Every structure is written in C-alpha cells, then in structure tokens.
Amino acid sequence: MTPGLAFFYGGMVRSKSVLNMLMMNFICIAVVTVAWILYGWSVAFGNANDAKGSGFWGGLTQWGMHGIATGAGSGHPALYGSSGVPIFAVACFQLMFAIITPALISGAIADRTKFVGWTVYVLGWVTFIYFPVAHWVFSPNGFINAKLHVMDFAGGTAVEINSGAGALACALVVGKRIGYKKDPMRPHNVPLVMIGAALLWFGWFGFNAGSSLTCAGQASLVLMNTQVAACTALLGWLAAEKIQHGTFTTIGAASGAVAGMVAITPACASVSPIGAIFVGLIAGIVCCYAVNLKHRFDLDDSLDVVGVHLVGGIVGTLLIGLFAAPDEVAAFSNGARAGLFYGGGPRQLLDQAAGAGIVLVYTFTVSFVLAKLVHATIGLRVGAEAEMVGVDQAQHAETAYDWGGLSGTLHRAAVGVATATARAQAPATTPARERH
C-alpha cells in the first residue's frame, strides 16, 4: 500500500516534485522498519499478553523483538494472545500500519519539503505519536480500547485521524507553496494517480480484513464492507463534485474511493453491508465538500490529506456510534455497545467521539511541536530557489522525465514540419530552360 500511496501522491504533484514524493514515501518504509524492530513493537504491543499491562504504552521489555519465541520450549510466548497467530507474523503485519501512517502526511507538504528534515521528522513522529497511539487503540490493554470501549477495527483513529492531524500540523508549520492560489498546480500524471488508487484499493482488503487475524466469517464481512464502502463513496463523491463543479473527474473518482476506505477502516467489522453503504456514501459526500474548505481557511494542504484522511477518519469513527450492528459488536470483547440506530442508545457514539477527540488533540499538539523543532534546527522546508527549480533537482539531483531529450525530438519534428510547410507555401518558380 505504501508504494501505491507513493504513486497516488506522485501523480498528483507537479512533474518537478514527483521523485521527492516517491522518496518521502519509500524512506518511511526503511526508517519505520528499523525503529519498529528496535523499540516500536515493544512500545505498541509489548504487554499485549499481560492482562494487567499499562494502558498507555507497552514498555521496552521486548525491545529488539527480545523475548519472542519461534518454537516451543523457550519459555517465551510464540503466539499473539489467544489468536493462535505467531507474534512475528502479527508484528510484521502491524509494521505495515506503522509505515503507511506517517507516509500519508507527506501529501500535505508536497512540492516544498527537505528530504533530510522529513526523514528526521518521520522518526520522531512514529516514536512519540504512532507507537503509543497504536498501543492505546490496538493493544488489548490500550486505554482507548479497554477503558473507553472504542471500536476501531483497523485504524480510523490510530491511522487516519492520526495522520490527518499530523498533516494539518505539518502544513501549518511548513507554510504555503510559492504561488499558491496564483499559479496552476494541477496533477501532472492522472493515469499514475489511478494506478496508485488501484494498488491502494487492492491493498486495503488486506489492511482491513487481515486485522481479524483469521480467514473466518469476520474477515469475510470486513472484506465485503471494504468493497461496498469504497464504491458508494466513489458514487457520493462524484455526485457532490457534479453539484459543485458541474463535471465528473478522474481524480474525484480516485479520491472518493479512498475516502470510502478511510471511513470504513474503523467500522468494517462492526457494521453490516447495508451500514457500509451509508458509511461510504456519507464519507464520499462529506469529504468532497471538506477538501474545498482549505481554500476558505487558506490552508495549503497540497494533496487533501486533511480533507480525506482526517475528515474521513472522524466520519467513519463516529458513524460506528450510529450503525454498529448487535451481531457484529458481539465479536468485540472490549465492552462496546450497538449503535444508536440499532437500539444501543447514544453511549457508543459518545465513546467514539471521545476516542477520536483524544487522538486528534494529542497528535496535533505533539506533531506541531515536533515540526517546529525540526524546522527550527535542520529545516523542514527547502529554500525559495530550490522550490522554484523543483525539489527533485534540488534534493535528489534527478528528474523524473528526460525533458531535454524530448525537447530535442520535438524540436526536430517541429523544424521538419515548418520546412515542409514553407516549401508548400513558397511561390512557384519557372525553370531556367523554360524562361528562354
């Protein structure tokens, strides 16, 4: 999914920034993997098998993946809780969540970010934000999971609201691009956007359904709900786009599908397929309108991370409080209740709002402070000249496209056409032998 996100974002930026965007995503894979092995897994899930573990962090007892067995007889647990799944398999699966969450932030600060500053920021962000928040939400001992009874099956808070709040903070610190609202900043490669969206769509099935840690009935429901919400959100976005702008766009279709999968991520195991229809439809419409608010608030969120991931994550998390079905809620063991529309009353809606609010406030605050610190020391934004030339050339000494060779080919072709045209339009002359 992270390479898919790289292509999705890469097609949306200008041609002089596409390599930087790809690199901002790929560096997350490397940096977060190393941090996850050293201490990230331990902080997020280190005490998952301990019924009395801390609700705020998992500790460092499993740093470096210490104390995890690969076979019987070692005295250390080899399986994750009662799931029957090896801890190493769960750790690798959860690592993918940890990788893509900071990568999502990159879209908000496209076209103007210093690569070294971004790399340091990602390391700090997962250390102080993602790893502890993942414990709060995903670990059986996490306080948002166990104490607030919040249902977040695959990361509406820990991934979507988390990344959206971080993107908002980063965009405010980094500031607007040169020429924002004045120069055209259209996507340079829409087919690349669609390729990225397709990879994300396919990968999201594993992202959501894999969170059940089984191939049984719950995973099947999640698989269906993910598909349904993506499709209804796509339709809802296109309808809202037609009302607002009078047309249906390819970028809108891709963004709508992503918005639906964002919203269904927390709700995929707690709603029925009918509920998934409404979750996706509502998210598609709301997110389409939300992305336009950045112009009203003068926020240069380059690729609409706030409007899609923050807003979509909030919508999906809250709609659980309305559409959570009793039969699906019974599969949860954290004391959650059915939604308001299924006779459960408003309590679950309030719990969902509390969980979303805690993550939003914590992540925005720490992200803002961290971005300020990085920006004030090693720098998070390139200089004006580098931004004008393009961050690909300035930061990586490369360009995505060989415009020089293409220009030469086009120039030769143009000269040939011009010469032929000039000859055709030239006045006819009489051969010398005919003049006499």
Image (tube, rainbow, N blue to C red):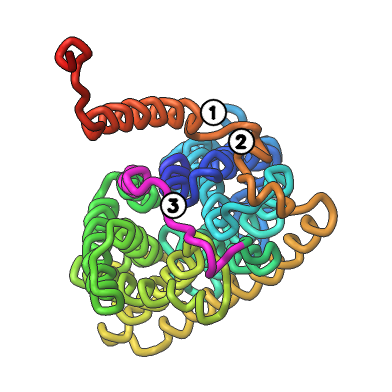
Outermost residue to the top? 433
Q: State the separation of the CA atoms marked 3 and 2.
A: 23 Å
Outermost residue to the left? 434
Q: What is the span of residues highlighted in magenta in the rendered image?
A: 179-198
- Residue positioned 75% across, 61% down in the render: 370
Q: For numbered disc 2, what is the local secondary structure? A: helix
Outermost residue to the bottom? 345
Q: For numbered disc 1, what is the local secondary structure? A: loop
- Residue positioned 52% across, 35% down in the render: 88
Q: Quadrant of the C terminus?
A: top left
Disc 2 or 1, which lies upstream in sequence? 2
- Give amino acid for label 3: Met
Look at mark 1 in the image and give the residue it sits on: 70
The answer, for residue 14, to whether it is visible in the render is yes
Q: Which of marks 1 and 3 is in front?
A: 3
Look at mark 3 in the image and give the residue it sits on: 12
Count the marks: how many? 3
Q: In which quarter of the image is the N terminus?
A: top left
Estimate the x, y position of residue 406 in percent, counting from the top left.
43, 29
**Compared to 202, does 174 lie above or below?**
below
Estimate the x, y position of residue 81 in percent, counting from the top left.
49, 48
Look at mark 2 in the image and give the residue it sits on: 30
The image quadrant that residue 241 belongs to is bottom left
